[in-house]
Amino acid sequence: MFGFGNNEKRLKQLEKQLLDTQTELHDVKNETVSLGNIERLSDLLGVNPSASGVVVNEHTAMRASAVYACVRLIAGAIASMPMQVYKRTTNGREIDSSNPLYPILHDQPNPMLSALVYWESVVSAILLTGDSFSLIGRNHLGDALSLTPLNKRRVEVKKIDNRLIYVVGFDDGSYAAYDQDDVLHIPGVGWDGKNGLSAITHAAQNAVGAALAADEYSARYFANDATPSGYIKYDKKLSTDQADLLRDYWLRKHQGLENSHMPAILTEGGEFHQLTITAQDSQLIETRKFQIGDIARIFGVPPHMIGDTEKSSSWGTGIEQQSIGFVQYTLRPHLRRIEQELNRKLFPRGNSFAEFNVSGLLRGDIKGRNESYQIALGGNQQPGWMTINEVRKLENLPAIEGGNTLYKPLTGEQSEAEQTSESNSGK
């Protein structure tokens, strides 16, 4: 399947590129692995080893609680924002719910999933793999009908005549090439002309690997009841067979949670000496805390927002300031990437455009909002720059009669009766 409007020359180029790609994939099992292609092959197969020896990819990384929390927080926050379609007007803009793309972006990108699930998967792919790919389903006129997310490992990006071509592999083993106009491609930081950089494999690989290794070590340690190591002392010398028999007996009777409180029985004058290890050492607290902060820093998330409350945020002391800082410095770059790709692929012409509505996350508490609204409406006898109905709309309240007039303070030339008359004329 090829993009709408492609000419015959490009079609032939795409067909040749597709055949070349199929040959490459067919012969990859016979390819000699060298230092030049080991990184590419490792990334394709998802077997990137970290310094700790733990394999780190987008799937294993989510086993680390800090990674899961960061991805859940960022992807969930963006997915919960309404994606609105607007049209430009003489007075600014207004929501265009009649636009055919509105239900696709706001409610259901395709029949298989809701908008929230779709946008959550898009942002998760950007954070974990460096790229999000979605196939734009079009009719014979070129109108977009659906958005279907694609697995990055099944998408190969090529460049022909300064245009990007996307070769996609499907579950049935078939391949298809798509022009750049038919693929919604949202790369993360570090785009190299074809792909973005994965935060997991390029920035957080060792941090995530260390976190996974620490989790595994702790789990195995506690599987044995976190019992501190020790030694059994005898006054007389034991033979090798006697020592092995005693060690096997001890492990069989006292190792594991089910035997953690079994009374120890030592014969022939044996005496057990425990080697002291603190609870802090057994839980690897300091190591795990460091990994949480390191991973949070890579994703741009304040540690306190993923449960690390020991460190305070530098964005402000109040919840309102911290939330606004999170939107401005962490979420906004992701929002702009998505919005710009949507607008250039789905709204290349006309007065319509798509944009996330972030007003809900930027609103302060009820006291702060009331004080701000009071100033906007014309408090302290200053000219108002918002009407009552505009304020009520922000608070999800219906409009009222006479609420569409901006407040103007009284002057010497204007009587109160005149101002009342102006207000009634704006109903």
Image (cartoon, grey):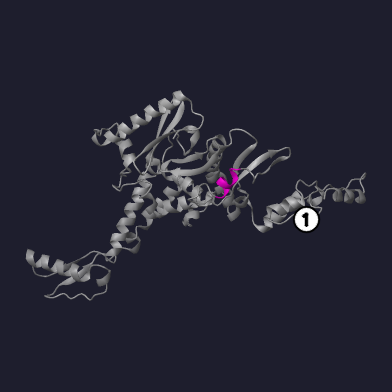
Q: Is residue 379 visible?
A: yes
Tell me: 199 left or right of 350.
left
Q: Residue at x 7, y 65 (%)?
A: 241
- Judged from this view, the residue extending furthest toward the front is 140
Q: Which residues are magenta?
A: 100-107
Q: Is residue 301 visible?
A: no
* Nearer-the-camera pick, 171 or 241: 171
Tell me: 338 left or right of 224.
right
Find disc 1 in the rendering and name its residue.
400
What amino acid does circle 1 point to? Ile
Q: Residue at x 39, y 51 (%)?
A: 62
* Nearer-the-camera pick, 144 or 394: 144
Quadrant of the rendered image containing residue 27? top left
Query: Measured from the top left, where is residue 162 in percent x and y?
Result: 46, 25
* Nearer-the-camera pick, 88 or 325: 88
Tell me: 8 left or right of 374.
left
* Nearer-the-camera pick, 379 or 49: 49
Query: Measured from the top left, where is residue 240 in percent x and y?
Result: 7, 63
Q: Residue at x 37, y 37 (%)?
A: 175
Quadrant of the rendered image containing residue 230? bottom left
| Residue 48 falls inside the magenta stretch | no
Mark 1 closeness class: few <14, some 14–19, many ≥20 residues within 10 Å: few
Magenta region, main secondary structure: helix
Query: Measured from the top left, where is residue 275 in percent x and y?
Result: 25, 64
Q: Residue at x 28, y 61 (%)?
A: 221
Whether residue 219 is situated above or below residue 57 in the rendered picture: below
**Secondary structure beneath disc 1?**
loop
| Residue 105 falls inside the magenta stretch | yes
Query: Measured from the top left, where is residue 332 in percent x and y?
Result: 55, 43
